[in-house]
Image: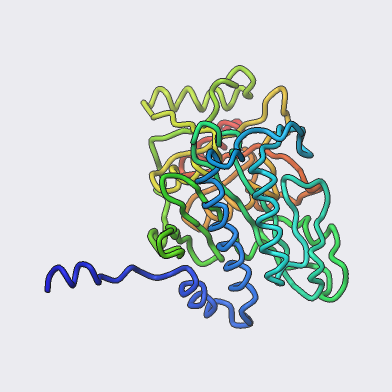
Amino acid sequence: MQAVRQLSAPVGITLSRFIAQEQKNFPDAKGELSQLLSDISLAAKIMNRDINRAGLIQTEGSTGSTNVQGEDQQKLDLIADTRFYRALRKGGEVCCMISEEIDELIDTGNHLAKYVVAIDPLDGSSNIDVNVSIGTIFSIFKRKSSPGCHPSLADALQAGVMQIASGYVLYGSSTILVFTTGHGVNGFTYEPSIGEFFLSHPNIRIPSEGKIYSCNEGNLDEFPEPVHEYLDECRKSRMTARYIGSLVADFHRNLLKGGIYLYPPTKKTPKGKLRLQYECNALAFIVEQAGGMASDGHQRVMEIVPQTLHQRVPFYAGSMKMVQKLEDFTNGS
């Protein structure tokens, strides 16, 4: 009987069931947001399959072209962009979306829909060829224009404080989807034999302090002097340097263990490199909901009002006390 009990133990709460339960936090909800999150999880499952067989079907490597950022486009970048666009368009709950891979606002044709999605379909894709963790990052906003009309640029150019949900998918040793709707942060691990995400990391809270700092110290000579001084303090305190080069992977580790992620401005990229709408806002929402902090060095990331779709900002995110100390340096305290 003991063996039977072990073999028939509960497998946990599925993502779809959890999302349905979350609707109680939105009195006016009619299921649209639940459908939208389900559409994202479906695309993530398909991408999990595509990534795991990339070496077998020759989808690794560059396309030989560049995206709107001037960066080399990987084959899986385009595949991921297509997968998420198709899932969100067919799901019917997104009136428009913006993607790191596309220059302009994308009209899905669902003009009665009330949601807007900003997405980095495949973050860290240059790491695919060496089998390093990569991810997807997304933000969800309510449209500002009236349902029924064509969406406008103003629908996409909203500050992070207007997000109603955000999340990321990390494709690694296991595939995990982490998201928030403004009521805490929860993580779901994919079970491929069943084809479901199950709640594995309930109510994630980031420690207020950590022992990890994550940045590309190869660019150290390009960093502003206050960041130099902060990193000197980290080293003197015997902190551990950990940098994977995939934003989602570095962020996820620090979210669970405590730490700070730094992508300062450099002489080459004086306004920063990471994109406000596709990367920084989503992760800022998550880390704040987990008890942490995200800053551009001077102000809260989510309060920055975007001026362009592909706007870049410096980005510092992680444990509250660590980011506050970084701000003390950058603000001259």
What is the x, y in percent for residue 183?
51, 67
**Residue occupying the point 53% across, 59% down:** 179
In-front residue for pair 87/58 = 58
Q: Which residue ends up furthest to the top in the rendered image?
A: 221
Question: Is 205 displayed left or right of 34 in the figure?
Answer: left
Given the current orientation, which residue lies at the most extreme left position? 1
Expressed as whole percent of the image width and height from the top left, the position of residue 231 reads: 50, 26
Query: What x and y, as percent, mark residue 326?
Result: 53, 35
Report the residue at 65% width, 45% height from top.
299
Classify the position of the C terminus by image quarter. top right
> Residue at point 78% right, 47% down?
102
- The image shows residue 240, relative to residue 103, as above or below, that is above
Give the total of numbered labels.
Answer: 0
Asked if 55 appears above or below 79 in the picture, the reply is: above
Residue 92: quarter of image? bottom right
Q: Quadrant of residue 188?
A: bottom left
Q: Is residue 98 left or right of residue 292?
A: right
- State the quadrant of the N terminus: bottom left
Percent x, y for residue 180?
53, 62
Return the residue nearer the eye: 311 or 196.
196
Question: Among all residues in the image, which is located at the extreme front?
Answer: 57
Residue sitting at x 18%, y 72%? 5
